[in-house]
């Protein structure tokens, strides 16, 4: 049987398409976990219910951050190891990534459940919002392992060249989540707790599907019991690369925490509800550029590991162009006609008006974000841990957080909304500054590889008359 990996393909554009399209549908449906909950809660519980979901969202982002840490860190290693032909070590990375996910998700669950009300107040919950946030967060924390593990497996499976299985697992979970939301919230009248239970059950089913993929023997890499033994050098390699994803998500969680607190101060509970809706819209708006980056990661990592630098450069060019075009298209829709999208979540006319007002300020520079997202993932795919960490942390910690703390003092609630385009501009400049030297380095490596390849080719006599020409040139010099 041919053991050639699907990533070993010089049709870079087609390969990116094959990996990005399933990732898009997969991410679309996993985003539905939060969006569907928000829609049902908005229509059957009310604006305070949406505010409760918005307060808990940073905790869910923390879970996703841990999943991305082990998932993207592990997938970066796996892609390069497959490209270098070291399948055995790639399987050891797979096993260690799973064990790390187990421990990290347990850490969130135990810490969060130790004092739910305290953490919710820190996150900005008012007394009116607290009961809704408490009911939702408690159940989400109990099922934290499955949310984190689902995120991890979606990256690890894709790193082996299979984008269909992650997509299928996410679709199964999302469809089940919608069905259970409708059942638990409407006829059973379980409110926000029903939404949380539906989410956890759906994630459990998704994780079971991923396990069945590895246990079936159809996967390129195998999840073997012997590889579940911790190898600290592998764990360190996973975390050193994946920490950028965690730092990005953690910084965003902290920033959203302060966004919520500033909105309470300058806009009230209705402003938090508006941000909760816009946040769900952002998740869909950025999805095309994010999945293009996810599709790029295994392609770039494989070709970089295989020293095929020309293909690596081509994949970067295609991905950056596609992500920028997609974000520009999304910007044109959301900036000029945001109201129809906000009405999906609520019928409260006051909330619709406030949400549209905020969206036109928050989405002002959305067309830059595609380049930012893909540019940040390039460093991760190449194993450039320091640059990856810088781009991951700077967006939220260095740009968004100070903007959120400073601008509202002068512009009130408008300062919160304008903090996002300010962050987009500063992040774009930083990524451009850092990515130019990486592109130049890849070009130099590509020229060197081609030169060495020609020399080897000539020495083996594969160029017909060219070895004779070289010999004559040597004689002439002599």
Image (tube, grey):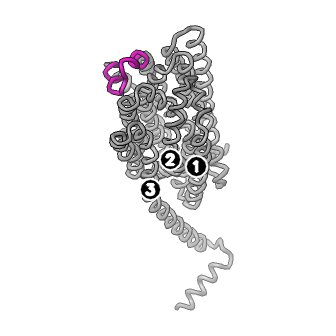
Q: Is residue 348 left or right of residue 104?
A: right
> Which residues are the magenta region?
116-134
The tally of labels here is 3
For the residue labelled by badge 1, is the local secondary structure a helix, a strand or a loop?
helix
Percent position of residue 3, x then y: 63, 45
> In terms of depth relative to the viewer, which is nearer, 46 or 424?
46
Q: Residues within 10 Å of mark 2 (few under 14, many from 20)?
A: many
Which circle's residue, 2 or 3, is located before the other in the chain?
A: 2
Residue that mark 3 sits on: 429
Q: Between 151 and 222, which is closer to the camera in this rendering? A: 151
Residue 229 visible to an observer of this rendering: no
Label 3 neighbour load within 10 Å: few <14, some 14-19, many 20+: few
Q: Residue at x 53, y 19 (%)?
A: 41
Which one is in front, 131 or 112?
131
The main secondary structure of the magenta stretch is helix
Q: Are marks 2 and 1 in contact (CB under 8 Å)?
A: yes
Tag 1 residue: 323
Q: Nearer the viewer, mark 3 or mark 1?
A: 3
Between circles 2 and 3, the one closer to the viewer is: 3
Query: Which mark is drawn over residue 373?
Result: 2
Residue 342 counted in the magenta span: no
The picture places residue 457, in percent across and down from the top left corner, at 60, 70
Point out the image quarter for the N terminus.
Answer: top right
């Amino acid at each position: 049987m041919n053991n050639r990996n699907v990533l070993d393909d010089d049709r870079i554009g087609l390969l990116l398409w094959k990996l990005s399209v399933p990732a898009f549908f997969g991410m679309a449906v996993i985003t539905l976990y939060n969006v569907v909950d928000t829609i049902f809660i908005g229509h059957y519980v009310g604006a305070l219910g949406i505010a409760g979901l918005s307060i808990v969202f940073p905790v869910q982002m923390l879970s996703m951050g841990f999943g991305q840490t082990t998932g993207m860190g592990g997938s970066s290693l796996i892609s390069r190891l497959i490209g270098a032909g070291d399948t055995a070590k790639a399987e050891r990375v797979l096993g260690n990534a799973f064990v790390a996910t187990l421990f990290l998700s347990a850490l969130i669950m135990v810490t969060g459940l130790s004092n739910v009300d305290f953490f919710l107040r820190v996150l900005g919950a008012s007394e009116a919002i607290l009961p809704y946030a408490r009911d939702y967060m408690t159940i989400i924390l109990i099922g934290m392992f499955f949310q984190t593990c689902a995120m991890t497996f979606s990256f690890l499976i894709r790193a082996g060249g299979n984008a269909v299985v992650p997509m299928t697992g996410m679709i199964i979970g999302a469809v089940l989540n919608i069905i259970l939301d409708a059942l638990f919230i409407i006829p059973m009248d379980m409110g926000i707790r029903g939404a949380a239970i539906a989410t956890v059950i759906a994630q459990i089913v998704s994780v079971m599907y991923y396990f069945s993929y590895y246990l079936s023997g159809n996967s390129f890499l195998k999840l073997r019991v012997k590889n579940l033994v911790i190898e600290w050098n592998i764990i360190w390699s996973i975390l050193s690369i994946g920490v950028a994803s965690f730092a990005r998500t953690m910084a965003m969680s902290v920033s959203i925490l302060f966004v919520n607190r500033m909105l309470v101060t300058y806009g009230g509970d209705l402003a938090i509800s508006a941000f909760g809706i816009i946040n769900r819209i952002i998740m869909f708006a950025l999805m095309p550029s994010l999945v293009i980056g996810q599709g790029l990661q295994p392609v770039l990592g494989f070709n970089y590991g295989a020293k095929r630098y020309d293909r690596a450069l081509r994949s970067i060019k295609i991905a950056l162009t596609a992500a920028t075009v997609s974000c520009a298209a999304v910007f044109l829709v959301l900036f000029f006609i945001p109201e129809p999208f906000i009405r999906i979540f609520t019928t409260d006319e006051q909330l619709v008006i406030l949400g549209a007002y905020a969206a036109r300020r928050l989405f002002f520079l959305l067309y830059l974000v595609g380049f930012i997202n893909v540019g940040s993932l390039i460093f991760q795919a190449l194993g450039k841990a320091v640059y990856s960490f810088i781009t991951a942390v700077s967006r939220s910690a260095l740009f968004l957080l100070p903007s959120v703390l400073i601008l509202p003092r002068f512009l009130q609630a408008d300062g919160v909304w304008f903090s996002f385009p300010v962050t987009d501009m500063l992040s774009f400049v930083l990524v451009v500054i850092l990515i130019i030297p990486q592109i130049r380095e890849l070009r130099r490596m590509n020229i060197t590889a081609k030169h060495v390849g020609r020399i080897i080719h000539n020495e083996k006599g594969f160029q017909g008359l060219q070895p004779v020409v070289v010999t004559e040139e040597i004689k002439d010099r002599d």
